[in-house]
C-alpha cells in the first residue's frame, strides 16, 4: 500500500493567515480534510485551507495520525541566527531623505535584519530591493499583496532588463518580509526564480599579478594586494584580519567568520611575511591588521582603489578588482597541480562544485592539446 502524503502551506487569504493543504487526489484524504472545522477551498491557490491557529494545526496532526504523513517542510522555518560578528550600522537608513510620497521600508523589517545579524551589505541590498517593491505597489498595503502581484512585479523587472542576480535579490528581500518579519514562512513557496548564470571567473596571468603588487604605493598597500592574491582572501576577510591571525610559526593565516560565518585557515607566503613584518614595525596596528590614520578599520573602498590604481600603473587594460586576485590565486594553484579539494579548503567553499568552476579557466590542460591548425 502506497504511503499517503499531505503538505502544509502558509497562505494569506483576505488578510487572514491560513493553513493550506495540498495532496494528490485521494478519496480517504479528501474525506478527512472535509471533516476539519471551517474547511474551505481556494480557487486562487487550488487547495483546501483553514484559518491558521495552534488548535487548527493540532487538529490536522490528529486527523491524519496513522493515515498520512504530514509534510511541514514548506510550513515551518529555520529561526537560527547568523554568527556574523560585524557591527551592524543602520544609521544610514534612518537619516535618508525622501519625498512625502515615498514608502519607506517598515521599521520591523530593519529590526529583524538587525536581530538576525545580517551583514551590512545584505541589509542595504534587502532594504533597497524591498523598498523598490513596495513603492511599485505604494497604494496597496504589503499584507494585501499576493503571489500573482509579486509575479507581475518580477515580470516587470525582466522586461526592464534587470539581471538574474538582481531578480534573485528582489525575491529574497520580498520573501524575508513575509516569511521572517510577518512570520509566514514559505508563503511564496511556488515563486519561480531565474536560471543561475554560469559565468566564468576573470583571471590574470601570474606576471600581471606580480606587476600589480610591484606597482603599489607603499608597504601597507603591497601587503593588502599580496594577501588578496597569495592567500585567496576576499576583500572583507582582509579587512577583518587581526595581527594575531598571522601565524608565522605554522605559516598559516586564520580567517575568522568568513563568508557564511565559517572560520578557516589559508596559507601564508614567505615573501609576504617579510613585507608584513616591515609593515608592522612601521605602522604598529592595534585592533585590526590594516587601520586608517585614526586607528579605525580600513575601508572596503580603499582596497578597491589600491588595486585599481596599481593595475593602472602596471598597464593592465582589463578591469581589475580584489576578487579577481582571489580567482587568480585558485586558478594558478590548480594549474600548478594542487588538488581541487585543497583549493576548496583554502577558499572556504562549502561545496566542491563552487571550486570546480576554476577547472574551466585553468590553461594547463590546453597545453596538452595540439591545435588542429598547427
Image (spheres, rainbow, N blue to C red):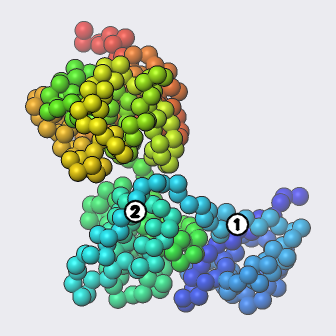
> Residue at left 70%, top 75%?
21
Q: Which residue is mark 1?
A: 72
Above or below, 342 relative to 309: above
Q: Residues within 10 Å of mark 2 (few under 14, many from 20)?
A: some
Above or below, 314 relative to 62: above
- In depth, the one of 255 and 51 nearer the eye is 255
Work out which quarter of the rendered image holds the C terminus and state it: top left
Disc 2 element: loop
One can see residue 86 in this view: yes
Work out which quarter of the rendered image holds the N terminus and state it: bottom right
Question: Residue 110: horizontal and vertical position, in percent?
Answer: 42, 72
Question: Residue 142: horizontal and vertical position, in percent?
Answer: 44, 82
> Residue at left 30%, top 28%?
276
CB atoms at circles 1 and 2 under 8 Å apart? Answer: no
Give the distance between the C-alpha atoms of the residues marked 1 and 2, in whole angstroms: 33 Å
Disc 1 element: loop
Which numbered dot is residue 88? 2
Question: Residue 97: horizontal and vertical position, in percent?
Answer: 22, 78
Q: Is residue 96 left or right of residue 334?
A: left
- The answer to which image quadrant residue 126 occupies is bottom left
Q: Is residue 39 left or right of residue 296?
A: right
Amino acid at each position: 500500500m502506497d504511503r499517503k502524503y499531505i503538505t502544509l502551506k502558509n497562505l494569506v487569504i483576505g488578510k487572514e493567515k491560513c493553513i493550506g493543504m495540498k495532496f494528490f487526489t485521494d478519496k480517504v484524504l479528501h474525506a478527512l480534510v472535509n471533516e476539519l472545522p471551517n474547511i474551505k477551498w481556494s480557487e486562487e491557490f487550488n487547495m483546501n485551507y483553514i484559518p491558521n491557529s495552534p488548535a487548527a494545526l493540532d487538529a490536522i496532526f490528529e486527523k491524519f495520525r496513522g493515515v498520512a504523513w504530514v509534510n511541514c517542510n514548506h510550513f515551518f522555518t529555520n529561526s537560527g541566527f547568523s554568527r556574523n560578528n560585524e557591527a551592524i550600522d543602520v544609521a544610514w537608513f534612518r537619516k535618508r531623505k525622501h519625498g512625502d510620497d515615498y514608502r519607506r521600508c517598515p521599521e520591523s523589517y530593519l529590526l529583524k535584519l538587525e536581530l538576525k545579524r545580517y551583514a551590512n551589505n545584505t541589509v542595504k541590498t534587502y532594504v533597497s530591493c524591498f523598498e523598490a517593491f513596495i513603492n511599485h505597489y505604494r497604494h496597496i498595503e504589503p499584507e494585501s499583496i499576493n503571489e500573482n502581484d509579486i509575479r507581475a512585479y518580477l515580470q516587470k523587472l525582466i522586461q526592464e532588463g534587470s539581471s538574474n542576480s538582481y531578480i534573485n535579490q528582489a525575491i529574497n528581500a520580498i520573501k524575508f518580509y513575509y516569511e521572517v518579519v510577518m512570520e509566514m514562512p514559505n508563503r511564496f513557496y511556488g515563486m519561480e526564480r531565474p536560471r543561475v548564470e554560469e559565468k566564468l571567473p576573470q583571471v590574470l596571468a601570474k606576471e600581471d599579478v606580480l606587476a600589480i603588487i610591484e606597482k603599489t604605493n607603499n608597504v601597507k598597500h603591497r601587503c593588502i594586494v599580496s594577501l588578496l592574491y597569495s592567500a585567496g582572501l576576499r576583500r572583507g576577510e582582509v579587512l577583518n584580519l587581526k595581527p594575531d591571525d598571522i601565524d608565522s610559526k605554522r605559516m598559516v593565516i586564520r580567517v575568522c567568520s568568513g563568508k557564511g560565518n565559517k572560520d578557516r585557515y589559508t596559507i601564508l607566503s614567505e615573501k609576504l611575511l617579510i613585507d608584513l613584518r616591515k609593515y608592522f614595525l612601521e605602522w604598529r596596528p592595534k585592533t585590526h591588521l590594516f587601520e586608517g590614520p585614526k586607528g579605525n578599520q580600513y575601508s572596503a573602498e580603499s582596497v578597491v582603489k589600491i588595486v585599481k590604481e596599481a593595475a593602472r600603473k602596471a598597464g593592465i587594460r582589463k578591469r581589475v578588482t580584489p576578487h579577481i586576485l582571489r580567482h587568480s590565486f585558485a586558478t594558478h594553484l590548480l594549474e600548478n597541480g594542487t588538488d581541487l579539494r585543497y583549493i576548496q579548503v583554502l577558499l572556504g567553499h562549502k561545496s566542491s562544485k563552487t571550486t570546480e568552476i576554476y577547472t574551466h579557466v585553468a590553461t594547463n590542460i590546453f597545453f596538452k592539446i595540439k591545435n588542429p591548425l598547427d
